[in-house]
Amino acid sequence: MENDNAILAFAALAQNTRLDTFKLLVKSEPEGIPAGELALLAGIPQNTMSAHLAVLSRAGLVVGERQSRSIIYRANLKTFQALTLFMIEDCCGGDAAQCEPLIASLIPCCPQKTADKRKTKANIKA
């Protein structure tokens, strides 16, 4: 990730409603949330939410997919991953021992839940 892209992403997240919306979309992966529902959850008008989603979208942090009359928004986890890696790529001058606590803290708090979801989806497809 280039500095300009990282700055754009951080600027998009540097506002309470957008940060809360992005976190909510990350939690709702992979299903996503319709734009209207996001506005209701945030307690703001739909046009205001649309403006916030446009900022997040321009930064590459969210993607919208039209489904019938609704637009379902999802977090762009690839951009989120790239932004996280951008921030830690020079961690501790390359000293793995120094970086170990940071890397350990990045492991999801619910790895079992994630593994269970994968198993369930695999069973459904089989």
Image: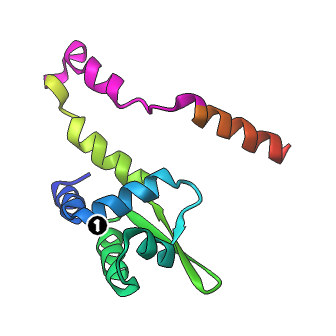
Secondary element at image label 1: helix
Q: Quadrant of residue 95?
A: top left
Magenta-drawn stretch contains 38:
no
Q: Position of residue 19 (x, y in %)?
A: 29, 59
Start and end of the magenta stretch?
A: 93-112
Q: Position of residue 125 (x, y in %)?
A: 82, 47
Label 1 amino acid? Thr
Magenta-drawn stretch contains 109:
yes
- On screen, 92 above or below 2? above
Specify whether 126 is left or right of 80.
right
Q: Position of residue 90 (x, y in %)?
A: 18, 32
Which residue lies under the disc numbered 1? Answer: 17
Residue lying furthest right: 126
- What sort of colour scheme is used for the picture? rainbow
Specify whether 77 is left or right of 7.
right
Q: Which of the pair 89/80 is nearer the observer?
A: 80
